Image (cartoon, grey):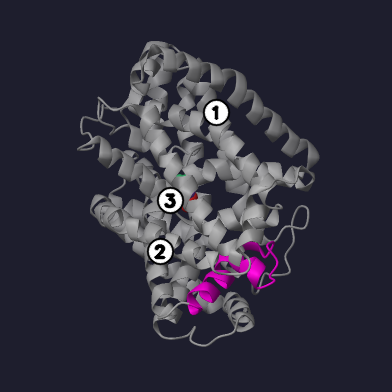
Amino acid sequence: MSEVVERWGSRRAFIIAVTGAAVGLGNIWRFPWMTGENGGAAFLLLYVVFLALLGLPVMVAEIMIGRAGRRTPMQALTFLARDVGKSRHWGLLGLFGGITLFFILSFYSVVSGWSIEYLVEAFTGGFASRTPQEIGSAFENFLASPGLVLLNHSIFLFLTMAVVASGVGSGLERLNNLLMPLLYLLLILLVGYAFTTSGFTTALSWLFKPNMSALTLTAIFNAMGHAFFTLAVGAGALMAYGAYMPDDQSLPRAVITVAVLDVAVALLAGIAIFSIVFSQGMDPASGPGLMFVTLPIAFADLPGGALWLGCFFVLLLLATWTSSINLAEPMVAMLGSAGLTRPLGALIIGVGVWLMGLPSALSFSIWSDVRLFNDMTLFDLATTLPIDIMLPIGGLLIAVFSVWVVAPPRAMEAIGAGERFYRVWRAVVRWISIPLLILVLLGFFLMK
Ligand code: PHE
Ligand code: NA
């Protein structure tokens, strides 16, 4: 259980790494899907409230634990608990996080595979002169072909595990940092295009004028889960990063920077996608395919559209690749501390995640008739379980650990923003985040 001595080279390097984990499918794919399914602005408002009251305070807690422990998540938790004479079983929270990451990666890889398919289609001219209807049915046909979906899932997972096995993740991160501004630029360009469509103003009022009667219990759970998912909080992935944080960095400032960027990316994607939805007379509640059936329509309208679409998916895949590496890394590190080499650990996790991805991959083809609990498809279940249930439970335990177990002087030092901030943060976590989390989770289990 030796202490980590390396640090990120600069404050910026830490922010870049955390942004790499945060920005991904959550912003561009799941945020529009969820917002569309849950009635628009009311969901958005709720999500922002959860981000502020739960996501951000727990993000501070999670990174603080990694920084105060300066060890891998399980070891940091055990070390900090022992330090104050508490049970070393707190280390199991790290294991729970690892299992959560395992489930997340299994569907994340499948959906990233859909993007690989789109990238290939775009560059080989597959989208040329297709009508919006044809784009929609082509997507459905693709999802209904188990072989193709599995092939792309396999390719994506292989690319992720290869990087994790060889430990060159930091090199990829630099590439990612170089290219991510281009993704943001493309999204801004898309919003510029959206502005010229007839659906733009409808999209804005639908996204920003809340109609509270649209709020359902499911919307509340989805919004809470998404607040954790989009920030990559609740499973210890960021705890692992905290261990390498430079000594003189203010944690809250870094966290706010990442969160603002993360929300901005989601909003840009949302505005672009819903403008297309409303100008084409589509249904906002189109489910997990929403991004895939709207963006090609937008790009098709631009000169050189297929090329732009291809570039977009290259950049999106780069963003999801770094997120996946961040998902896989803590699991492989965990096997590493149990004595396994990186390649062997990556192989075991890779095979496990591939198998776990089968229900998601086949949910739209051979297993499309399977319905469990409350009429959920396998894909719904594979996304809901880790995002809406496991991340909030992990987040709750992390929050409890951060304010009731970690010795206050250690916590205050690891947050690195002075005593006043520490007291305010601790009060928010104790009296707002924790009760709110318990309330919503209880609601979930009582009502379902
Ligand atoms: N935050 C990532 C996204 O929005 C997903 C993620 C969750 C990555 C948890 C790492 C850990 O796509
Ligand atoms: Na995100």
Q: Earlier in the sequence, mark 1 or mark 2?
A: 2
Residue 227 appears in the figure: yes
Residue 355, horizontal then vertical, whole percent: 51, 62
Q: Earlier in the sequence, mark 3 or mark 2?
A: 3
Which element carries disc 1, helix, strand or loop? helix
Question: Which quarter of the rendering shows the N terminus?
Answer: top left
Q: Are marks 3 and 1 in contact (CB under 8 Å)?
A: no
Q: Residue at x 55, y 28 (%)?
A: 397
What separation in Å lies between label 3 and label 1 (alpha carbons)? Answer: 24 Å
Q: Earlier in the sequence, mark 3 or mark 1?
A: 3
Which of 79/175 is in front? 175
Picture quadrant where residue 45 is located? top right
Residue 23 disc label: 3
Mark closer to the observer (3, 2): 2
Would you name the residue on which mark 1 appears? 397
Q: Which residues are magenta?
A: 276-301
Which element carries disc 2, helix, strand or loop? helix
Near mark 1 (Cα within 10 A), the count class, few <14, some 14-19 or many ≥20, is: some
Residue 186 disc label: 2
Which of 220/386 is in front? 220
Mark closer to the observer (3, 1): 3
Picture quadrant where residue 293 is located? bottom right
Is 245 located above or below residue 329 in the figure?
Answer: above
Q: Note whether ligand 2 is within 8 Å of mark 3.
A: yes
